[in-house]
Amino acid sequence: MAYDPTMNKPAAEGGTLRTPVIVDCDTGIDDSLALLYAVASSDCEVVAVTCTAGNVDVRQVAENTRCVLELAGRPDIEVAIGRETPLARKLVTTPETHGHGGIGYAELPPARMPLSPRFGPDLIVEEARRHPGELTLVTLAPLTNVALAVLREPELPRLLRRVVIMGGSYRSPGNTAPTTEWNVNVDPEAARIVFEAFGGEGSNARWSERPARPIALGLDVTERAKLLPEHLARLAALAGCEPDGSIRSGGSSAGSAVNPIVRYLADALRFYMEFHSRYDHFYGAFVHDPLALATALDPTLVRTEAVTVEVELGGRLTTGETVTDWRRVWGRPPNLDVAVEADVDRFFDRFIERVGKLAAERS
Ligand code: BDR
Ligand code: CA
């Protein structure tokens, strides 16, 4: 395993203060940006990545995930495949948002790194047991794998240090149906299992043993993270190339044709920006998943409110809605820390600096 437990400790104790994370994703354009951000962050150690069916089918998710990790120079990271379908519904993918292959107009060489022999939900449970109280789980996809993991190991919430979820729309409209967000909409049964298991008291738990509530980033905050062409231009400049990835003549990398990471970003994001231009009326892209990943490394990027949330399963129009008790009319303990504000400027500065530096190094 790549994960070294000393990394969780301060330097004075022999550690390096890196946050060890397991990323569960359905790569996906914005998922791929989150993976690049994770690899580019010196305060992050990616322990493993688990793949969930969502934006594309799960085999394609695993292929995209490995291609992006190889692009980032990290073919050593374990990538495990999860369940092929949501718990109770047919999988509906989203080629109009992410392209048929899931990474927009980008083309990457076929993945060479092997797939893990482990099943994604088993990997989550096994790593959490191996490093109790240390790992952060970041979910950027439908919650299918995490639901299976917690059904297998009900103690999972206490075994993890923190859970950060991209999913839901708590005060804002949905992006899939009028009141539902994509990740929850794809597998609402899984979301309900996870929200209950991670936010509940658990049968034997004393109050002090209750796990930290998951931090949930819904569209309320992730749609404030609008990546614009000027952000990409700043990142490319840091990497010493043009926004399409071509190397500036006279730069240190002159002679090579392109910067592969910037070229990838340009091609993937062109598709994503065209989609947003059609559906959301601006030429740019919401980068939901990178904001969630960045929050897992630094929760001060968001301000949260503790609220009680249930997932609607039986609605005629509202199945998948994250019904949120803002006025505490249910009188029940909160089960999620929902993000209500995000420092998106600070997030974009970090994204550009970190991924730009990685791109320069991989030029
Ligand atoms: C979520 O849906 C997916 O298409 C994105 O990757 C993100 O995780 C936003 O609703
Ligand atoms: Ca995603």
Image (cartoon, helix red, strand yellow):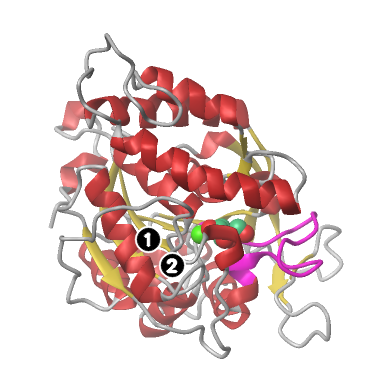
Label 1 element class? loop
Inspect the magenta stretch and tell me whether residue 224 lies in it: no
Residue 107 position, x and y percent, is: 35, 53
Q: Quadrant of the C terminus?
A: top left
- Give above or below for 163 relative to 357: below
User: Residue 146's image quarter?
Assistant: bottom left
Extreme residue in the bottom direction: 88
Label 2 element class? helix
> At x 39% / y 75%, what residue is drawn?
58
- Give above or below for 74 relative to 345: below
Question: Which of 115 and 295 lies nearest the eye of the viewer?
Answer: 115
Say whether residue 58 is visible.
Answer: yes
Residue 152 position, x and y percent, is: 36, 84
Question: Which of 256 and 124 lies nearest the eye of the viewer?
Answer: 256
- Give above or below for 163 relative to 314: above
Asked if marks 1 and 2 touch (Cβ < 8 Å), the reply is yes
Report the disc number at residue 119. Answer: none
Q: CA distance from mark 1 to mark 2?
A: 6 Å
Q: Is residue 274 left or right of residue 204?
A: right
Q: Which residue is mark 1?
A: 160
> At x 23% / y 27%, what residue is drawn?
361
Report the disc number at residue 157. Answer: 2
- Give above or below for 9 relative to 313: above
Residue 45 position, x and y percent, is: 26, 45
Q: Is residue 10 left or right of residue 355?
A: left
Question: Which of 297 and 257 lies nearest the eye of the viewer?
Answer: 257
User: Residue 316's image quarter?
Assistant: bottom right
The three-letter code of the residue at mark 2 reads Pro
> At x 63% / y 64%, what residue is drawn?
335
Residue 50 position, x and y percent, is: 33, 66
First to last magenta residue range:
165-184
